[in-house]
Image (cartoon, rainbow, N blue to C red):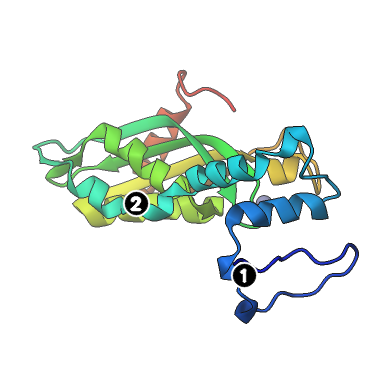
């Protein structure tokens, strides 16, 4: 039997682990959160909400169940090509780990091969795996670059993410128009010429403005 986590209104107390919170279903916890927000979880429109939120959160964080290295290992090809490979405007939706609110935008990935390339669709999959976790934009950017670097040891990798954060837009400083740009440059992308070539390719028409 699950312990009820609800306590009488207005009384807050920390639930100790040994009281069995782990046995409380996620659905029950969302029901409790709804009532703490001042809602009536038993009203019609909210009856199925805890269940829906549980499902939707599981989807939005499904990247924890996936191994990014494995996705790339299944799609590496030997090639004799040493020009820049660039995949731009990959749609990205993630949740910030500080507020669990969405941030979303575009990811641009480039690398210069050193004997091996990755199937293009796998780069979008890789973005998805890391984005479907609680994130900060800087780490997301870095993880994409590092995973590609580790998988195919190219001459270099560049990743740029432009995103808008609902935690900034809906609350706090409410800078509704601002977007945040982060980049991670590895290997030859640390050299000015390569980096500038990448950035100019990203900015060519076709890259939709946020
Ligand atoms: Zn945030």
Q: Which of 56 and 113 is in front in this view?
A: 56
User: Which residue, given by chain and number where applicable, does mark 2 sit on?
Assistant: 66
For residue 3, which quarter of the picture?
Answer: bottom right
Asked if the beta carbon under badge 2 is closer than 8 A to the nearest atom of ligand 1, the reply is no
- Whether residue 99 is visible here, answered yes or no, is no
Q: Nearer the viewer, residue 168 or 97?
A: 97
Point out the frontmost of discs 2 and 1.
1
What's the mark number on residue 84?
Answer: none
Q: Which of 141 and 203 is in front in this view?
A: 141
What's the mark number on residue 21?
Answer: 1
Q: Quadrant of the N terminus?
A: bottom right
Q: Which of 155 and 165 is in front in this view?
A: 165
Label 2 SS: loop
Label 1 SS: helix
Residue 180 rendering spot, x and y as whole percentages: 61, 43
The answer to whether residue 174 is left or right of residue 79 is right
């Amino acid at each position: 039997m699950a312990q009820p986590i609800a306590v009488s209104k207005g009384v807050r107390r920390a639930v100790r682990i040994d009281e069995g919170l782990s046995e409380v279903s996620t659905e029950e916890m969302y029901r409790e959160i709804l009532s703490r927000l001042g809602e009536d979880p038993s009203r019609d429109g909210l009856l199925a909400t805890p269940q829906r939120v549980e499902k939707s959160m599981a989807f939005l964080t499904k990247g924890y169940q996936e191994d990014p290295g494995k996705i790339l290992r299944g799609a590496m090809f030997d090639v004799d090509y040493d020009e820049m490979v660039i995949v731009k405007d990959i749609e990205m939706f993630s949740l910030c780990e500080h507020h669990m609110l969405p941030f979303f935008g575009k990811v641009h990935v480039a690398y210069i091969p050193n004997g091996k390339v990755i199937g293009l669709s796998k780069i979008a999959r890789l973005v998805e795996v890391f984005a479907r976790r609680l994130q900060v934009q800087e780490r997301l950017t870095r993880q994409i670059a590092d995973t590609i670097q580790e998988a195919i040891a190219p001459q270099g990798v560049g990743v740029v993410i432009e995103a808008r954060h609902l935690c900034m837009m809906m609350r706090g400083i409410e800078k509704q128009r601002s977007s945040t740009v982060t980049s991670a440059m590895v290997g030859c992308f640390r050299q000015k010429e390569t980096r500038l070539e990448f950035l100019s390719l990203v900015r060519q028409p076709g890259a939709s403005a946020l």
